[in-house]
């Protein structure tokens, strides 16, 4: 029961004691992943960047610092109202300047125009999507031809979460996710092992082809 509750909160934190604890865990566990995802997408000053499942907003902070061009724009989507509110507060200055737009929305209904995004990144979230195939197609739809998506994760942590019944099924497995990406129109799909600041994690790369 507790494992399922924690798993549910990890996927969609709410204003609750468990949600607060999960937010603290996300700050500790995901910050390195978020910062490195931003590095790996090779953001350019004029890019339009999309972060999916932005959580408290640490990845948004890192990405916004790189969009120094007048046309540079950052979009964030999260279907947790709690995370949306937290990130909105964190990014309020950039939002006021018009450089950042945050949407409280699920993946399939995100109000992002087709063929409008240069780079996409997300961390520890694909296994919470209700439908992996539909989610991958929704992302591919908003990406420009040849644009890049990077997903960061800690495979060791996922295996542990699965063994504790925090994650169930097989959607957490990178090979499942990568197969879905390929079938949804992505190419050059690959996973790399990366070490950063004594942290080991994995990054999955995928390019959108129209």
Image (tube, rainbow, N blue to C red):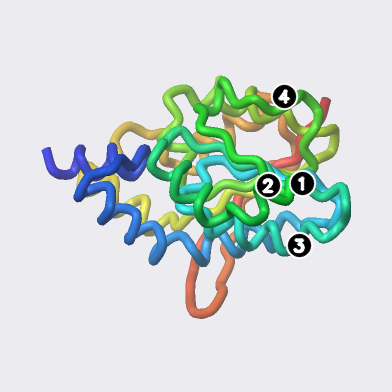
Marks 1/3: CA–CA distance: 10 Å
Q: In terms of image quadrants, where is residue 168?
A: top left
In the image, what residue occupies the spot 13% across and 43% down? 2
In the image, what residue occupies the spot 50% across and 37% down? 78
Q: Are marks 4 and 2 in contact (CB under 8 Å)?
A: no
Q: In terms of image quadrants, where is residue 138?
A: top right
Horizontal side of 199 relative to 73 (left or right) equals left
> Residue 74 appears at what percent x and percent y?
70, 47
Quadrant location, the C terminus: top right
* Between discs 1 and 3, the one toward the N terminus: 3
Residue 110 lies, with reference to residue 199, above or below; the image says above
Residue at disc 4, secondary structure: helix
Marks 2/3: CA–CA distance: 12 Å
Q: Is residue 121 visible to the viewer in this orientation of the structure?
A: yes
> Residue 166 appears at what percent x and percent y?
25, 44
Q: How crowded is mark 1: few (under 14 residues within 10 Å), some or many (20 or more)?
A: many
- Disc 2: which residue: 100
Residue 141's label in the rendered image is 4
Q: Do the residues labelled 2 and 1 touch (CB within 8 Å)?
A: yes
- Disc 3: which residue: 66
Viewer-side residue, 146 vs 93: 93
Marks 4/2: CA–CA distance: 21 Å
Marks 2/1: CA–CA distance: 6 Å
* Between discs 2 and 1, the one toward the N terminus: 1
Residue 73's label in the rendered image is 1
* Between discs 2 and 3, the one toward the N terminus: 3
> Residue 112 appears at what percent x and percent y?
69, 28
* Between discs 1 and 4, the one toward the N terminus: 1
Viewer-side residue, 166 vs 54: 54
* Between discs 4 and 2, the one toward the N terminus: 2
Q: Is residue 205 visible to the viewer in this orientation of the structure?
A: no
């Amino acid at each position: 029961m507790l494992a399922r509750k924690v798993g549910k909160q990890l996927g969609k934190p709410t204003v609750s004691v468990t949600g607060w604890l999960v937010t603290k865990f996300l700050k500790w566990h995901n910050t390195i992943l978020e910062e490195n995802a931003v590095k790996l997408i090779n953001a350019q000053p004029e890019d339009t960047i999309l972060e999916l499942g932005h959580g408290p907003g640490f990845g948004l902070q890192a990405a916004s610092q790189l969009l120094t061009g007048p046309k540079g724009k950052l979009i964030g989507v999260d279907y947790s109202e709690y995370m949306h509110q937290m990130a909105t507060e964190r990014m309020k200055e950039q939002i006021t300047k018009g450089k950042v737009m945050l949407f409280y929305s699920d993946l399939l209904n995100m109000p992002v125009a087709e063929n409008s995004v240069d780079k996409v990144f997300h961390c520890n979230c694909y296994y919470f999507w209700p439908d992996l195939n539909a989610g991958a197609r929704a992302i591919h739809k908003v990406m420009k031809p040849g644009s890049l998506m990077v997903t960061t994760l800690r495979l060791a942590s996922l295996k542990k979460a699965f063994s504790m019944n925090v994650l169930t099924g097989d959607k957490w497995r990178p090979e499942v996710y990568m197969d879905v990406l390929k079938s949804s129109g992505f190419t050059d799909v690959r996973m790399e092992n990366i070490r950063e600041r004594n942290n080991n994690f994995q990054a999955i790369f995928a390019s959108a082809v129209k």
